[in-house]
Image (cartoon, rainbow, N blue to C red):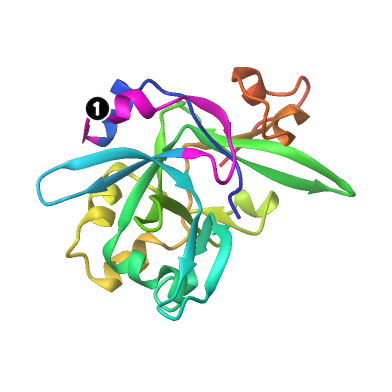
Amino acid sequence: MCGRISLFSELGDLASQFRFALGQTNDDYRPSWNIAPTAPILVVRADAHERLASVMSWGFTFRSRSGSGSSRPLFNARSETLAQRPAFRAAFAERRCLIPANGFYEWRSDGGKKTPMWIHRADERPFAFAGIYNTRPTEAASIITCEPNSMMSAIHNRMPVMLSDEQCYEWLDPDADPETLNVLLASREWPDMAAWEVPNGVNRAGNDGPQLIEQVDGATPRLL
């Protein structure tokens, strides 16, 4: 599961790195160190000519043609069932997107205690999650998760699918074949990732600010 992320880079820097056009997003984007499900997130998608960015709700609801479905926001989508589950099948085929982030949080189980960890690139550059989005009833996106790699397995039993710069092009390609997409969704090692313990303030979704990602004194960072 991925239930909390952070994105606080300048929008112009994000536009340069992820190659999207600036527009209305310039007014909607708000940096945050503690983004929880249902909050606004930055989403990058491709049309026939360029990449576009917009702010959407994190987690979409699903309604079938019969009117049945889930009213609870679906903020994560398991990579293993994307092509089969009705809630995600059409979005996976037609509406893939990038969800930029500076890092994400996960809670490590230490006995009966839950310890918040911030997972990020060691060089502090943003990266992109593989995502899918819906446009109805409102624009909303979900982050795709996969089995954990060796670093994350010591923290949690799931992790978000993270894409390299080259893989971003493949993920957004409307003509990508299923085999290519499945390779992108597979768990892999990330030698440039780091994780460290952060203050418990992140536990409260209403808290925000750079203090939430500061390493706890005395804690040893984990490097892959």
Which residue is nearer to you in this view: 222 or 209? 209
Magenta span: 19-40
Q: Amino acid at mark 1?
A: Ser
Can you say whether 220 is above or below 191 in the image? above
The spot of residue 185 in percent (x, y) is: 41, 62
Q: Quick check: 121 left or right of 112?
A: left
Q: Which quarter shows the C terminus? A: top right
Q: Residue at x 65, y 55 (%)?
A: 153
Question: 10 Å neighbourhood of mark 1: few (<14), some, or many (≥20)?
Answer: few
Q: Residue at x 43, y 70 (%)?
A: 82
Q: Residue furthest left?
A: 49
Is residue 149 shown to the viewer in this render?
no
Q: Is residue 185 magenta?
A: no
Which residue is nearer to you in this view: 199 or 43? 43
Give the quadrant of residue 71.
Answer: bottom right
**SS class, disc 1:** helix
The spot of residue 107 in percent (x, y) is: 72, 44
Q: Residue at x 35, y 47 (%)?
A: 98
Q: Where is mark 1, residue-wise?
A: 16
Q: Residue furthest right?
A: 112
Give the quadrant of residue 176.
Answer: bottom left
Q: Is residue 28 magenta?
A: yes
Q: Which quarter shows the N terminus? A: bottom right
Is residue 60 shown to the viewer in this render?
yes
Which residue is nearer to you in this view: 119 or 31? 31
Q: Quick check: 188 left or right of 136?
A: right
Q: Residue furthest front?
A: 67
